[in-house]
């Protein structure tokens, strides 16, 4: 479909995507009113991925590109998952070391005021 | 290669897995898109890694600090008519950026239809929404700085909160500001017929659009990981 004339698609698909992004952002914001927990985290990640996917696939036209471009651009970021795993592993190690050697935090936070 | 051979080759261009093999081994350009678009995608890929490094380092300092992490929904809350609404300004900023992504997508579409007037005004609207976003961010920064948030300390919890906040949102805000200038330059050239004199191609609008949608995309991740988490 990516002809010499470039990416031309019916306007309707953009309106639908636009509306979907508004609704999904509303849902994202609504998770802030939920109690913390696995469900809230899962919903934050789900809405985030749906929004990101919609932007890349429809607005950035990646869905209509050839597989070679899709792979060249979308496959490398998967490596970031390894960095996330490594850094969270090390982060917990550092936190435990700090507690073992310096004790628990004695920081007394102020309540935010506006 | 003669026109006839090229034509017949295009007609049998394979897709899917065979297409990848074909594209990477055909002894000419791999991606059948304008070079500017391929380069913008590659730039955005590198930018993805930069923002990922920021967000991953934010994750790491947040995990490793023993001090309590400030609650973003309180820190970024606003009091409206005596009611405290969590993350209000951030939510409005999110909707402003999404709206600008929508106007940009329409601008790209009208660009390919060679409707210069609509393309120009939609790009100007996108740039204005982007400028609104940056202004609200400036307000947010001012408010936090006046409350005592610094890159090295803050009264609400772990010091790393301030450094992550200013680094991540600052770098994103810089991208938005650069995008506003980029969009205005391209919009002006659409208006004054610059691209008409160069063969009437409007793929530059799509390339500028890719950058703009990417800025919106990064905000989706910042909103989820920094403000909501």
Image (spheres, rainbow, N blue to C red):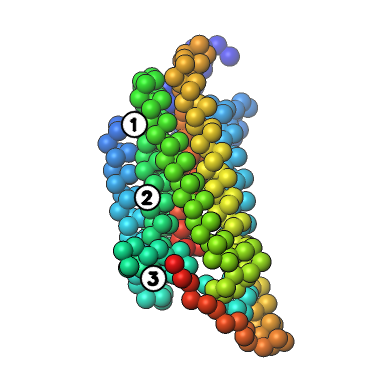
**On screen, B218 above or below B102?**
below
Q: Is residue B130 left or right of residue B159?
A: left
Q: Residue at x 39, y 34 (%)?
A: B125
B33 and B198: which is toward the camera: B198
Which chain's residue wears label 3? A
For disc 2, the neighbor class at 10 Å (few under 14, some 14 to 19, many from 20) is some
**On screen, A114 above or below B113?**
below
Residues beneath discs 3 and 2 located on the same chain: no
A86 and B177: which is toward the camera: B177
- The residue identified by callout 3 is A40
- The residue identified by callout 2 is B95
Determine the CA span between mark 2 and mark 1.
Answer: 24 Å
For disc 1, the neighbor class at 10 Å (few under 14, some 14 to 19, many from 20) is some
Say which mark, if any, is on residue A109: none
Determine the CA span between mark 3 and mark 2.
Answer: 21 Å
- The residue identified by callout 1 is A9
Which chain's residue wears label 2? B
Residues beneath discs 2 and 1 located on the same chain: no
User: Which element type, helix, strand or loop, lies under badge 3?
Assistant: helix
Q: Residue at x 63, y 69 (%)?
A: B153
- Number of labels in the image equals 3
Pick out the residue farthest to the right.
Answer: A101
User: Which element type, helix, strand or loop, lies under badge 1?
Assistant: loop
Choose top left, top right, bottom left or bottom right for residue A81.
bottom right
């Amino acid at each position: 479909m990516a002809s010499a004339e470039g990416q031309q698609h019916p306007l309707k698909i953009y309106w639908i995507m636009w509306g979907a992004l508004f609704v999904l952002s509303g849902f994202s914001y609504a998770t802030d009113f939920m109690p913390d927990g696995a469900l809230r985290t899962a919903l934050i990640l789900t809405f985030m991925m749906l929004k990101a996917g919609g932007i890349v696939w429809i607005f950035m036209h990646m869905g209509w590109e050839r597989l070679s471009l899709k792979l060249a651009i979308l496959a490398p970021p998967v490596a970031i998952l390894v960095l996330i795993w490594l850094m969270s592993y090390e982060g917990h190690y550092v936190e435990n070391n700090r507690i073992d050697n310096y004790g628990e935090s004695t920081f007394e936070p102020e309540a935010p005021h506006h | 290669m003669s026109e006839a051979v090229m034509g017949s080759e295009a007609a049998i261009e394979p897709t899917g897995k065979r297409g990848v093999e074909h594209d990477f081994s055909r002894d000419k350009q791999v991606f059948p898109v304008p070079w500017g678009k391929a380069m913008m995608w590659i730039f955005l890929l590198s930018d993805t890694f930069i923002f990922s490094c920021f967000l991953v380092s934010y994750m790491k300092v947040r995990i490793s600090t023993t001090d309590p992490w400030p609650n973003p929904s309180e820190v970024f809350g606003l009091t409206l008519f005596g009611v405290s609404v969590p993350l209000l300004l951030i939510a409005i900023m999110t909707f402003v950026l999404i709206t600008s992504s929508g106007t940009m997508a329409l601008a790209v579409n009208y660009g390919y239809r060679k409707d210069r007037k609509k393309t120009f005004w939609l790009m100007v609207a996108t740039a204005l929404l982007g400028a609104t976003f940056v202004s609200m961010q400036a307000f947010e920064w001012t408010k936090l700085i006046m409350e005592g948030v610094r890159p090295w300390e803050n009264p609400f919890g772990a010091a790393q909160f301030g450094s992550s906040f200013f680094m991540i949102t600052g770098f994103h805000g810089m991208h938005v500001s650069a995008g506003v200038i980029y969009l205005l330059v391209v919009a002006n050239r659409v208006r004054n017929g610059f691209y008409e004199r160069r063969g009437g191609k409007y793929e530059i609008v799509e390339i500028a659009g890719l950058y703009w949608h990417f800025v919106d995309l990064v905000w989706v991740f910042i909103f989820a990981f920094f403000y909501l988490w």
